[in-house]
Image: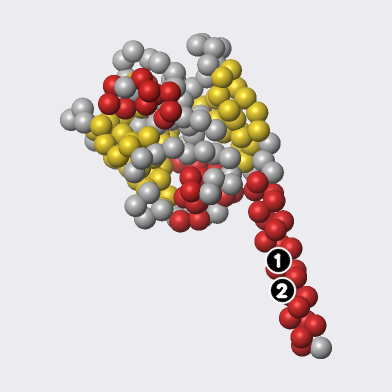
Amino acid sequence: MKIFSIRITIVFTSILLCFSHFTLSAQTKGTLTDSDDGRTYKTINIGNQWWMAENLNYFIEDGSWCYNNDSANCAKYGRLYNWETAMRACPRGWHIPTKAEFEVLIGNVGDENTNAYNQLIKKDTSGFKALLGGSLNNNDIFNDLNINGYFWTSSKDYLDHIWYLNLYSENSNAFFYFSKNVVGLSVRCLKN
């Protein structure tokens, strides 16, 4: 009787694992065409949120850059934006997510650590296709291409520091950080 119970538990656990993997992998995909520049982006539905499945690459003369000022980097990683520019760069009907909205994304793909990093980048079973696009610091130095992916939120702390999501390849981790000293980060837009 014990052997039978153990086998049922193992089978049930295997079914749950397969079902969990299937529901995460079977996300609805779509596209979004930015009416301002005609660029088309892939989109993905994760949980009850619609996300861009690519980094934003909308040119704004003041406040956006290609990593190392190389247009090939914009084509692959999207543009880096200062926060003020990022807040007005998303296509109509989309917006810069709040910290809480990013937390919902992370909750839908795992948790705020290695599992979320793996789902968003390494294994990318979520369809989010996060890229490690680096940053531009306040000394006009580009940093961390293919090491860190930084994504603006629209949220500030009580000292007006701006929160951003950091996906860090060296320890395969996803976590939130805030700063007043960052100039250019990547943008992922969320549907209103």
> Which residue position holds label 1?
14
Report the residue at 78% width, 75% height from top.
8
Q: Quadrant of residue 94?
A: top right
At which x and y percent is residue 56?
46, 25
In the displayed structure, would residue 74 be above or below residue 123? Answer: above
Q: Please report the residue visible at 25 percent of the width from the left and 32 percent of the height from the top.
A: 142
| SS category of the residue bearing label 2 | helix
| CB contact under 8 Å: marks 2 and 1 | yes
Choose top left, top right, bottom left or bottom right for residue 184: top left
Q: Is residue 41 visible?
A: yes
Residue at 52% from the left image edge and 38% from the top image edge = 129
Quadrant of the image for the N terminus? bottom right
> Residue type at mark 1?
Ser
What colour scheme does the image use? secondary structure
Q: Residue 133, how many percent across, how many down?
A: 37, 35
Callout 2 amino acid:
Ile
Task: Tell me the distance, in whole angstroms, between the alpha carbons under discs 2 and 1.
Answer: 6 Å
For the residue labelled by badge 1, is the local secondary structure a helix, a strand or a loop?
helix
Depicted 15 relative to depicted 155: above or below = below
Q: From this viewpoint, which residue is outermost toward the front?
A: 72
- From the viewer's side, name the closer residue of 83 and 144: 144
- Along the line of sight, which residue is nearer the eye, 176 or 149? 149
Task: State which quadrant residue 48 falls in.
Answer: top right
Q: How many labels were placed on the picture?
A: 2
The answer, for residue 106, to whether it is visible in the render is no
Dot label at residue 10: 2
Q: Badge 1: few (under 14), some or many (20 or more) residues near its Cα, within 10 Å?
A: few
Image coordinates of residue 126 in percent, x first then y, are: 58, 44
Q: Which quadrant holds the C terminus?
A: top right
Q: Position of residue 27 (x, y in %)?
A: 67, 41
- Label 2 neighbourhood size at 10 Å, few (<14), some (14-19), many (20+)? few
